[in-house]
Structures are given as structure tokens and as C-alpha cells.
Image (spheres, rainbow, N blue to C red):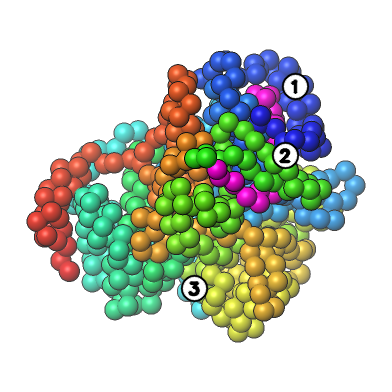
Amino acid sequence: MGRPQAPGSTRRTFVARAATVGGAAALGLGALSQGAHAAPSTGTVAVLGGGVAGLTAAHELAERGFAVTVYERRALGGKARSFDVPDSAKGTRKPLPGEHGFRFIPGIYHNLPDTMRRIPFPGNRNGVWDNLIAPPEMSFTRAGGREDIRLPIPGRDGQPADLTPDDIARALTAFLDTAFSIPAHEVAYFVNRALVFLTSCDERRDDQWEAKPWWDFVRAEDMSYDYQRILAVGVTRNIVATKAEVASTRTVGTLGEAFVFNALGRGADGPPDRILNAPTNEAWIDPWVRHLTSLGVEFRVGWTVREVAYGGGRVTKAVIEDADGVRRDVTADHYVQAMPVEHARRTWGAALRGADPQLARCDKLRTDWMTGIQFYLTERPKIVDGHFNCIDSPWSLTGIAQAAHWKGRDFPADYGDGVAVDCLSVDISEWDKEGILYGKTAKNCTREEVAREVWAQLKAHLNDTGKQVLTDGKLHSWHLDPGVDGIGGPHPTNDDELLIHPVGTLHNRPSAATKIPNFFLAGDYVAVDIDLATMEGANAAARQAVNALLDRAGSDAKRCAVKPRYRVPELEGLKRADRTRYRLGLRNAFDLG
């Protein structure tokens, strides 16, 4: 039980197991992490998917004595992983590091950092969590000769004073007045809308604001270009990765609320912006896999789930195609499906869907493209020491020059051919609008055209005020996420789409516990408190799935902690008053219309 009918494991599994044994012995680490349970095996679990959700579920289950096998079709770490750029290494150097998109682990996350603290890393007291660093600043870069806006990122210095709605309004107004050339009356209106959301009760958020697009909530159609680009499009496309015209106000507002209070030092695990101090696999994913292997987790990489079979009121097997293309029946006591929703729902047949209506509702969940491209440079660019947001870019670009943040790495000595000295990692959030170079959407461009178009949009933002931050002569090479295929042709595809949040999404997101007693869901599309497709959401969903499994199995093991979003105590009274107003059919007390 819990193992495929034919033996075998990947070479990566073997290497990881060997490295873990030697590394743990050298470090004096035990087989179990902090808080782990050395209980006898309480059953077998097939974890279908090896991204953040799957690895989290495996971690929690292995600590509680379950025999776990993870089946992953491509590479462990999923969209969060980094990977080698093919044919880019020379001599003893590693290949250039590529990635689906740059890592961003803000202080609003709590569950994911807890997991990271429990993954041993040589020399780190707090495991891979100690590999997180906070960039000192960020910028909003403008095109057309407008000066870029550089902003320091606030830290967390002691306990702040109590907050009132007036304090929040003043802070937002000062920020917007200082940072952006938005008319004063528009700033005042946006601040009012922020206060309306902040003081709205949960019922109003889940009903009224879930049904209203952010674009309409902030009246973007009637406002200036800067208001639209920064406060409507900028927030939704560059951070939430969805379209402002359709994005749920509840989702956008929830994220904005969390970041505001993170910046004010409230309810945060750390600063608002954190990144890893090395490529993701080196700093996080590979140590995680080694640790899970030491806990007894087995991995089958290159195995693709084709069907979750149902019969007699239970999942009876998972039909999985192995690395050689042979279909196998995998059986276990429990199944945790930790695959992206667009891939998971293809494996659900009519019988399984009929057993739990929430599975059918997952067909209504929507995904979109948000994909990374890396530019390797022969000189370090003189740009902001942190993330930058290209406010005026048609393709909604965000990026970061990474090498300066990898303090323990000598980039040209460690990676590539020794000529490239930095990696400029850029996320493309908009694939359906025309660019400035070819007049085509990203989906209609070839890979080469995408690279040239992104490079042109970057130069339009970074070189437009007399500076020469990026020049063609400094461009060594580029690498576009391999998950994108067929662009420039009639049927472009993306193997790594991202869940987006149009109105009504909340009510179609499933719970981790299904009505099938041995089947559980984990992934960033599962209903969790953060209400956003993030690594934090994937981690929290996996914890909820494990807790549900423990309940169904009758286990007395300690349940996983699932920390909710921070709620500001000073606003709870206003939310209670708003609940009364909402039930009476009245608008929020701050709502001026």
C-alpha cells in the first residue's frame, strides 16, 4: 500500500537520500525536525503533486508517522523552483539559474515561514528561514521621461502605537501624496474606499465586495491615468496577478489590507518584502527534499497523474503514468491531491465529481498567464536595490536584479561561462495587450520577440531620464520559462498558469476536506484565509488537508497549526457595527458612495 506496483525511484531521490544521511550526520541533526512525532506508521498516503502544497503535506504527514510517497510529473518545487538554463555552464561552474518567476515572501506570510524554520540548513539556527533577506527599497519606474519613485521598505522596530481609522487615513494619504502625482481629490477618494473596506464586516466582504470588481469599487473609469495605472491596474496585475476590471474587491482589498499593516509593523513575520539569498533550489527546495527524504518520504519524479479513480464511496486508486510512459495503478490508504487546479480537475471523472459537488464547481475557477523571463548581464545594472514595478509597461512588468542580494555567491565564478555577472529576473503579468516594439500581444510573439519586447519595455522605463541603465551591449543572454509553448502560433499554451480572482471566485474554491473519506485537496486554489494564489495559500491548504486526514484516520497526532491573517484589534468594534448595518441593508458608515 502507498507504493506503485513496480519498484524504482529517480536518481534525484537516491542522491538526495545519500546527501541527507551524510549531511545530517555531519550536523548532528536527528531524523525528525522540531515538533515531529515519532509515532508508528498510521497508514500510507499518496501525495499527488510535488510543489509547495505537496511538499508541505508530505512534511507534516511524515512527521506524524505516515508512510508518504510523492508523485510529481516534472520537478519538485513546482512553480516555486529554480532550474538550470540548458547548455549555459562552462568549466566547473553551475548552469545559469532560471525560474518561473522571482520569489517573494512578504511578512504577511506566517504558515510558510513556519515550515521554512523546520527545514535544516547547514550553519543556520532557523533552517532555511535564515536564508530570507529583506531588500532595503523598491521603486515604481515610469516611462516617457517621468522620474522613477524609490521608496524605502519599512522594517519592524518595536511595538507601534495603537491605530485609529484617522491614523490609517493619514498614513495612506501621506504615502500617495508623496509618491505619486495623483490629484488630491482622487487620493482622498481612494483613501475613503480603503477605509470602507478596512471597516467592512466579514459578511459584507464575502457577499457585497466579493461580487464587485475592484475597478468599479475604486471608480477607476472616472479617474486619471496615474490613478488607474497605480491604484487599479498596478495593484491587481502586478501583485494579485488578475485584471482590475474583473478582480474581486474582497481579494484585492484583503491583500492590500495585509500589506498596509505589515508596513506599519502589525501582525507580521517580517518586513513587507523578503527574498532568498540564493537561487530557490539552493536556498530552499533542495534542502527541503533532503530533509523529507530523511523522514522517510519517497519521491517519484516524472510520474504524471492521469486519473483519480472512485468506487464504493472511496478513491480506489490513482492511475499514474511513470517516467517511462507506462500506466500504473497506485494504491494508498489516503490520497492528497496537491496539483494546480487546471491539472487536477482533468483527473476527476464523473463518479468522483458526483460524490462531491465542490469538485464540479472547480471548473468555474479561472487561471491566467504570469510568467518569468531572465536576462543575464555582463555588468550589474545601477537600479533600485530591490524590486521594481514598471508602472507604464503594457505587459505589466515587475523585476529584480538578483546577484547583489546573493551575498554568499560570486555570480560569474559560480554560474554560467564567467562572463555574465547578474541575473535580471522579470515577471510578465499581461500577455493579452499589444507591446511597444512589435504591436503584438505576448501570446502572439515568438519567444525571441517576447525577449526583445520585454527588453524594450524595460529600457523605456529605466533609460528614459538620461540614464543608461540597460544597454544592448551588456545583454549576455536570456531565458524564458519553458512552460510557455507555441507562442507566436495559433495555439499558445502555458503549463504553469496562475489562479486569478474574478468576482465570485471565493464561492467556488473548494475546502481541503472533500466528501470522499480518503481524498483531500491541497493547493493555492483551495479555500484558505489569505484568499490568494500564493505559496502561503498552498502551504496553509496543505496543513488543512493534513488536519482533515488526521480527523478521518482517527489519529491522536498533534494537528498542524494554521495561522490566520492578522486582524487589527482596533478595527473589530467598527466591523461589529458594520455587521449590524449590513444586516439592516445599510451601507458602511464610511461609504460616501
Looking at the rendered structure, the kind of residue marked 1 is Val
The residue lying toward the viewer, choosing from 545 and 11, is: 545
Tell which residue pokes out farthest to the left in this image: 584
* Residue 432 pos. (x, y %): 55, 75
Image quadrant occupied by the N terminus: top right
> What range is drawn magenta here?
286-311
Tell which residue pokes out farthest to the right in this image: 91
In this figure, which residue is indicated by the disc labeled 1?
21
Q: Is label 2 or label 3 in front?
A: 2
Secondary structure beneath disc 1? helix
In this figure, which residue is indicated by the disc labeled 2?
300
Badge 3 density bin: few <14, some 14–19, many ≥20, Cα 10 Å: many
In this figure, which residue is indicated by the disc labeled 3?
392
Are the residues tagged 2 and 3 within 8 Å (C-beta)? no
**Residue 126 figure quarter:** top right
Of the numbered discs 2 and 1, the one sitting upstream in the chain is: 1
